Image: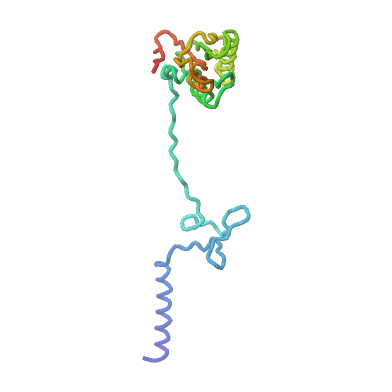
């Protein structure tokens, strides 16, 4: 074989290899700029530096993550137990605690959404420590605090809702008389409360005490 023919064959083989190899090459994302260490170069705003968009094979291509939104159903007022409609107070205080706020926030959503709610009566209580007159005023402050909060959260019937207080005349605890003051205060926790009693329209299911 002549040297001329040999040269032509070498050129032809090189051309053939050059034609075939791209078909087997890995996806090329060099349109995203890389530094000398092979790391993707980012602009000051955090985006990738690129020469052109190549979403299909781009190491900086945006990946769409699908999320599922679960719709939460609002509970009806009748589904709230007596305990869930009761908020408790610290000793000698009428301010709402974080737990009381959480309960009222859940309850007011049902009161606003449930068309079967006729009204909500608010009843304030106090423990037996202190005079009769003092605890009557304290239970009044607690009841009015709950009423005002329900109104502030958008329950418009709160202005005309019956609000009453009974002081220490209707205790729910049975604590021993002979114990130190701190233990007695802790034992009487359930007497320092406000209960929201719900009346429903005729045909509505009354709240079940649990």
In this rendering, position of residue 42 left or right of residue 178: right
In this rendering, position of residue 131 left or right of residue 77: right
Pinpoint residue 161: horizontal percent, then vertical percent.
54, 10
In this rendering, position of residue 30 left or right of residue 4: right
Q: Is residue 185 above or below residue 24?
A: above
Pinpoint residue 13: horizontal percent, then vertical percent.
40, 79
- The quarter in which the N terminus is drawn is bottom left
Q: Quadrant of residue 35 in the image?
A: bottom right
Q: Residue furthest front?
A: 178
Q: Residue furthest right?
A: 44
Res 87 visible: no
- The quarter in which the C terminus is drawn is top left
- In this orientation, which residue lies closer to the viewer: 85 or 60? 85
Q: How many marks?
A: 0
Q: Is residue 11 above or below residue 172?
A: below
Q: Residue furthest bottom?
A: 2
Q: Is residue 203 above or below residue 186?
A: above
Residue sitting at x 44%, y 18% = 77
Pinpoint residue 51: horizontal percent, then vertical percent.
57, 60
Res 177 visible: yes
Residue sitting at x 55%, y 14% = 129
- In this orientation, which residue lies closer to the viewer: 139 or 118? 139
- In this orientation, which residue lies closer to the viewer: 188 or 69? 188
Pinpoint residue 125: horizontal percent, then vertical percent.
52, 13
Q: Residue furthest left?
A: 1
Q: How does the figure colour the protein chain or chains?
A: rainbow
């Amino acid at each position: 074989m002549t040297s001329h023919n040999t040269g032509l064959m070498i050129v032809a083989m090189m051309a053939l290899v050059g034609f075939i190899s791209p078909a087997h090459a890995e996806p090329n994302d060099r349109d995203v700029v890389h530094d000398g260490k092979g790391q993707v170069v980012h602009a000051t705003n955090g985006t990738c530096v690129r020469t052109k968009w190549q979403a299909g094979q781009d190491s900086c291509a945006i990946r769409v993550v699908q999320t599922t939104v679960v719709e939460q159903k609002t509970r009806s007022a009748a589904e709230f137990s007596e305990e869930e409609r009761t908020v408790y107070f610290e000793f000698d205080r009428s301010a709402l605690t974080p737990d009381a706020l959480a309960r009222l926030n859940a309850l007011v959503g049902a009161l606003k959404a449930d068309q079967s709610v006729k009204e909500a009566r608010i009843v304030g209580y106090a423990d037996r420590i202190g005079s009769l007159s003092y605890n009557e005023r304290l239970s009044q402050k607690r009841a009015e605090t709950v009423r005002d909060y329900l109104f502030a959260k958008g329950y418009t019937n709160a202005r005309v809702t019956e609000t009453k207080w009974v002081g220490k005349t209707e205790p729910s605890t049975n604590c021993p008389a002979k114990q130190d003051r701190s233990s007695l205060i802790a034992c009487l926790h359930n007497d320092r409360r406000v209960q929201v009693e719900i009346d429903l329209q005729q045909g509505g299911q009354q709240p079940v005490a649990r």
